[in-house]
Image: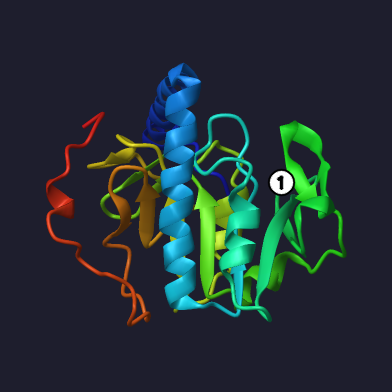
Amino acid sequence: MPDFSDEAEVTHEAKRRLRVELLARRRALPAARRAQAAASVRAALVDLVRRLRPARMTAYVPVGSEPGGPELPEALRAALPPDAELLLPVLREDLDLDWAAYPGPGCLVAAGRGLREPAGPRLGCSAVADAQLVVVPALAVDRGGRRLGRGGGSYDRALARVGGTALTVALLHDGELLKHLPAEPHDRPVRAVVAPATGLRTLAAGPVSAPALPLDEPGSDDAPLALE
């Protein structure tokens, strides 16, 4: 049952205001800076994929000012082992996420809300449960792993299905890793973030069973944070 308490309304409004501010910042980024940031994010993720070698991973096609750029799926597919699967989301009418395999750029078709999605067979909402690496969008993440999305709840539902040993990674622009975010009971945390200047940073959302993962990168907690 939805929580209509005064506290819940305050949290909801705080998240709404923060979304407006963060989206405005992203829209204001010059095209050259967006392209440079996208290349840095892709490079960090490619390095992670090559070291973790997941048998199945999920990602998405960034749109507009989202970090990673539209080339992200192809860069990840090329970095995966030959027999590994890359799944991309397919948004359902109820805003939940189905999944389909990404075999190459020719499989993508235009979808609602400006998205691009794979046209292949749907694998079901539970397909994400078998992924060892799950890459998700975010407008901001805090040090506890709490993630601010666009408000539809699609990725909170998907993250609730992810296996306990999977590495969940949100993609950010610089300045979007914050000290604290307002959160609601349905919000699901992530375990790491990737940003252009800092690359991969692990968070306090829980342990990760990945020996090759560079945990506790020196100096990473001392990086300046915006909107604190």
Residue 70 against residue 25 in the figure, above or below = below
Q: Secondary structure at mark 1?
A: loop
Residue shown at 38% from the left, 51% from the top: 194
Give the residue type at disc 1: Leu
**Lateral position of residue 219 relative to residue 35, left or right:** left
Residue 148 against residue 190 in the figure, above or below = above
Residue linked to disc 1: 95
Front residue of this view, candidates 142 and 116: 116
**Lateral position of residue 99 relative to residue 214, left or right:** right
Residue shown at 86% from the left, 61% from the top: 120
User: Which color scheme did the rendering employ for the protein?
Assistant: rainbow
Q: From this viewpoint, is residue 144 visible?
A: yes
Q: Residues within 10 Å of mark 1 (few under 14, many from 20)?
A: few
Residue shown at 87% from the left, 65% from the top: 121
Circle count: 1
Residue shown at 18% from the left, 53% from the top: 220
Rendered location of residue 13, percent (x, y)? 43, 26
Q: Quadrant of the C terminus?
A: top left
Rendered location of residue 34, percent (x, y)? 47, 30
Residue 152 against residue 73 in the figure, above or below = above
Rendered location of residue 195, percent (x, y)? 36, 45
Image-quadrant location for residue 115: top right
Rendered location of residue 191, percent (x, y)? 37, 62
Residue 59 against residue 22 in the figure, above or below = below
**Lateral position of residue 154 relative to residue 141, left or right:** right
